[in-house]
C-alpha cells in the first residue's frame, strides 16, 4: 500500500519542527577542497526549497512544517560529485516520517569529517516509517532519540 493511500480517512496531520543545519561544509586537504554534509526535505511529494538561512558555509533552519501523508528527510555526506563511483564515496541516508498523534523528538547526525558533523533536530507528531542507509558505516550512530 502506498504512503499516499495509507492516511486516507484518518485525517491525521503530521507536524514537525526542524532545527539545526541543512548544510555545513568545510575546506580540507592540501588542495583545500570542500567536504560537506546536508539534508534535503521532501513533504507530500514536494521538494521544500529556500527554507533555511545562509550563514557563512552553512544553511541554518528553525521552522515548523505540516504534512498529510509523508515527509522524507534525505541526508548526504562526502565530497562533491559522484560519491558512489569512487572508493571513498559519500554516504546517503533517508528517513521517511508518517503522521501520528504521538509526539517524538530525535536528532539526526551526519559526520562528514573527523571533527565535523551536520545535526538536525526533528520534533513533533510523527512516526518513523522507514530508514534507508547507503554506503553507511554501522559503527557510527546516525539517529538519537530524546525522551
Image (cartoon, grey):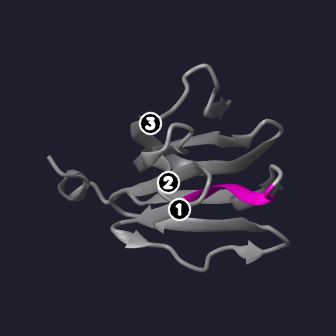
Q: Where is residue 128 in the image (x, y as percent from the top left)?
A: 44, 39
Q: Give the range drawn in magenta.
A: 31-39
Q: Which residue is drawn at 53% across and 43% down?
A: 89
Q: Which badge, 2 or 3, comes first in the chain's sequence? A: 2
Residue that appears at 53% across and 62% down? 40
- Residues at marks 1 and 2 touching, judged by CB atoms closer than 8 Å: yes
Which residue lies at the image location 32% right of the left edge and 59% below the top edge? Answer: 69
Residue designated by label 1: 40
Tell me where residue 127 sits by quadrant. top left
Image quarter for residue 71? bottom left
The answer for how far apart the CA atoms under marks 3 and 1 are is 15 Å
The residue lying furthest to the left in this view is 1
**Residue beneath label 3, please?**
133
Q: Nearer the viewer, mark 2 or mark 3?
A: 3
* Image position, residue 65 (x, y; %): 55, 67
Q: Is mark 2 on a helix, strand or loop?
A: strand
- Where does the image place residue 27, in percent across and percent down from the top left? 81, 57
Crowd tier of the residue under label 3, counting other residues whose Cα lies within 10 Å: few below 14, some 14–19, many 20 or above: some
Determine whether the residue tagged by mark 3 lies in a helix, strand or loop: strand
Amino acid at each position: 500500500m502506498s504512503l499516499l493511500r495509507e492516511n486516507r480517512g484518518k485525517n491525521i496531520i503530521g507536524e514537525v519542527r526542524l532545527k539545526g543545519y541543512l548544510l555545513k561544509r568545510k575546506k580540507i586537504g592540501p588542495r583545500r577542497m570542500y567536504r560537506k554534509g546536508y539534508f534535503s526535505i521532501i513533504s507530500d511529494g514536494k521538494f521544500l526549497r529556500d527554507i533555511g538561512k545562509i550563514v557563512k558555509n552553512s544553511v541554518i533552519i528553525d521552522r515548523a512544517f505540516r504534512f498529510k501523508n509523508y515527509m522524507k528527510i534525505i541526508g548526504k555526506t562526502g565530497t562533491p560529485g559522484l560519491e558512489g563511483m569512487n572508493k571513498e564515496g559519500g554516504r546517503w541516508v533517508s528517513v521517511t516520517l508518517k503522521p501520528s498523534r504521538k509526539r517524538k523528538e530525535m536528532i539526526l547526525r551526519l559526520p562528514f569529517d573527523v571533527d565535523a558533523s551536520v545535526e538536525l533536530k526533528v520534533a513533533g507528531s510523527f512516526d518513523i516509517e522507514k530508514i534507508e542507509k547507503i554506503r553507511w558505516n554501522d559503527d557510527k550512530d546516525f539517529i538519537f532519540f530524546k525522551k
